[in-house]
Image: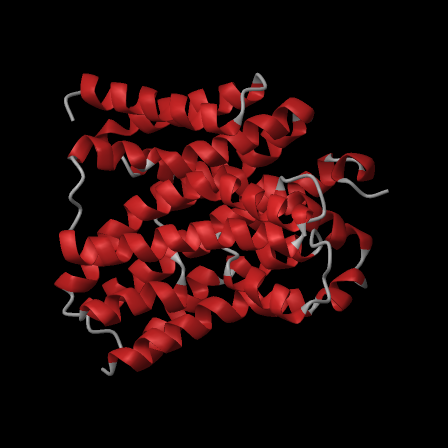
Amino acid sequence: MNKLVLILTCSAVTLLPRIIPYFASSYLKKLPGFIRKCMLLLPVASLGALIFPLALTDFGPLWIAGLVGVTTAFLTSFFRGPMILAIVIALLSTTGMLMAMGA
Amino acid sequence: MGNGIKEVREGIHDGFPIFIGYFTTALAFGLLTRTSGFTFVEGVLVSITNFAGSGQFLMMNLYNAGTFLLGIAISVFFINSRYIFMAASLSGKLRNPSSVPGRIMTGFGTTDEVFAVASFKGVKLPYTYMAGLIFTSYAGWVSGTAVGYVAGTFLPDVVQKAAVITVYAMFASLLGGEVRKNVKALLTASVSALINTILILVIGVSTGLSFLISLIAATIFGAVIYTDKEAGIE
């Protein structure tokens, strides 16, 4: 298989689904109210599936380290901590857990 | 002009955690392209022209398995189909939706992470901000691929493993902020977390399809439990 053809084909099927909706916004505005409401709630709905289960399974048998990381990050921001602090705390707690479990 | 530079810098600032997460993930991707028989230029070109984590790994795995081009294209399209919904959602948040180069750039850069960060910005997004956010993320992805091709995943195992948490911590942090404002956010996100986990771990559905089903189900659930005002409809 020609690798350049492969690469550019995959580029097309990746970028077209991302770019085309930005050129359909006049149609999107005409959609029923409930669909437009869905568009507003899609970001928060996506967060659960963006985190679980991959934040756990990426760590294999040490999945608890991933769980500790995302939980500390969640709590930090819930109690008004800035995102960068949430990430640093998650990094430290995950690393700590990994080392404690002998990774 | 001064405002524009400030917005670019804010985008770069917000993109920094994505840079860390992408760079470390792309190291593994760069190594994979080398072990799959790609030249350095070909390996880096994948990341330059695709800019997609799961889609690129899927492409390499199918290529290594000897799948036909059409089969690879359909599978990669399928795993990327969620972006249609994410892009449609994010298009409503742009400050100037009519700029053609601005929309192409934003579309090019609409990854899961860029989408999430931009969506919760709470203001109409200028393209200067999006440029800073996307360029920072893109730089991490492409440079990580190049370094990974040459040096492999050279980071100590514990650092490499821990760095994986960066992007998930970013998502969890965004969720924490939303839940503080409205506890219904926790319910809505829990629906997609639960469905995605069951579909992947129990039923064994592929991650692309599983994510799409979870996203749509949780979005409808959210639209039912949120009032119009809470959702941001005046």
The colouring scheme, among rainbow, by chain, secondary structure or one colour, is secondary structure
B234 versus A39 height, above or below: above
* Residue in the foreground of this view, choosing between B209 and B176: B176
Spot occupied by residue B233 in the image (x, y as percentages of width and height) = 81, 43
Image x and y of residue B57, in percent: 30, 58
Horizontal relation, residue B73 to residue B13: left or right: left
Furthest residue to the right?
B234
Q: Quadrant of residue B150?
A: bottom left
In the visual, does A40 lie left or right of B214? right
- The residue sitting at 57% across, 20% down in the picture is A78
Q: Nearer the viewer, residue A24 or A48?
A: A24
Tell me the quarter of the image containing the C terminus of chain B. Answer: top right
Which residue: 46% across, 61% down? Answer: B80
Please state the horizontal and vertical placement of residue B199, each as a whole percent of the image.
42, 45
Measured from the top left, where is residue A7 in percent x and y? 33, 74
Q: Is residue B173 above or below residue B73?
A: above
Q: Return the residue nearer the eye: A38 or B111.
A: B111
Which residue is drawn at the image coordinates 73% and 40% (left, top)? B224
B227 horizontally vs A42: left or right = right
Image label count: 0
**From this viewpoint, is residue B206 visible?**
no
Kindly tell me whether residue B125 is visible in this rendering.
yes
Q: Residue at x 49, y 68 (%)?
A: A15
Q: Is residue B166 depicted above or below B3 in this figure? A: above
Q: Is residue B103 left or right of residue B161?
A: right
